[in-house]
Image (tube, grey):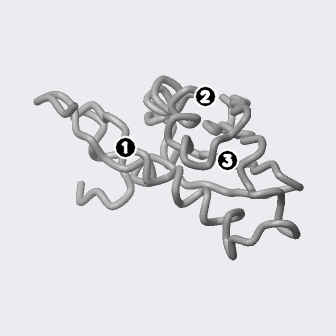
Amino acid sequence: MTTPDTHTVPLYRLAHGRTGDKGNRSNISVIAWHPELWDVLLEQVTEARVAQHFAGRQPSRVTRHVLPQLHAMNFVLDDVLDGGVNDALNLDSHGKALSFWLLDMPVQVPARLMHRLAGSDA
């Protein structure tokens, strides 16, 4: 919920991502555009929120690995690739599609940090 002191924006305004897959597991990294955004990411982009965001893919487990010196985190999502690249009937249930989905997740940003977001005019 947006308040006068916060704004709701998609995660891609705060961070970019990289992704990979192996078997039926997807790895999605989230890397802050600016160090000042790290605390917002750490607080809001949690295992529970990512699991909820991917509920339609039914991950059996979501694990977050935090890399504070890089202002990054890596999520490992188990059992989200319809059996894996070679077994999936879905044309793109893996790779970039899942990182794009995660980067669309809404987050709350304090107004004082809006100038740090990607696409900001400030």
**Total numbered badges shown on the rendered structure:** 3
| Three-letter amino acid code of the residue under disc 3 | Ser
Residue 34 percent coordinates (x, y): 48, 44
Q: Distance between the residues labelled 2 and 1?
A: 15 Å
Secondary element at image label 2: helix
The structure residue drawn at horizontal position 23% and vertical position 60%, both measured from the top left corner, is 121
Say which of 14 and 84 sits in front: 84
| Three-letter amino acid code of the residue under disc 2 | Glu
Q: Which of marks 2 and 1 is nearer the N terminus?
A: 2
Circle on res. 29: 3
Residue 33 percent coordinates (x, y): 50, 49
Q: Distance between the residues labelled 1 and 3?
A: 17 Å
Say which of 75 and 32 sits in front: 75
Q: Which of marks 2 and 3 is in front?
A: 2
The structure residue drawn at horizontal position 69% and vertical position 30%, both measured from the top left corner, is 64
The reply to whether the C-beta atoms of the residues labelled 2 and 3 are less than 8 Å apart is: no
Q: Which of marks 1 and 3 is nearer the N terminus?
A: 3
Say which of 46 and 116 sits in front: 46
Q: Earlier in the sequence, mark 2 or mark 3?
A: 3
Q: Check the picture and name the quadrant holding the N terminus.
A: top left
The structure residue drawn at horizontal position 55% and vertical position 54%, both measured from the top left corner, is 16
Secondary element at image label 1: strand
Q: Mark 1 points at which residue?
A: 106
42 in relation to 80, above or below: above
Q: How far apart are marks 2 and 3 (CA)?
A: 13 Å
Q: Is residue 52 left or right of residue 61?
A: left
Density class for disc 1 (Cα within 10 Å; few <14, some 14-19, many ≥20) is some
Residue 38 percent coordinates (x, y): 51, 32
The structure residue drawn at horizontal position 50% and vertical position 31%, both measured from the top left corner, is 49
Say which of 77 and 7 sits in front: 77
Q: Mark 2 points at which residue?
A: 47
Secondary element at image label 3: strand
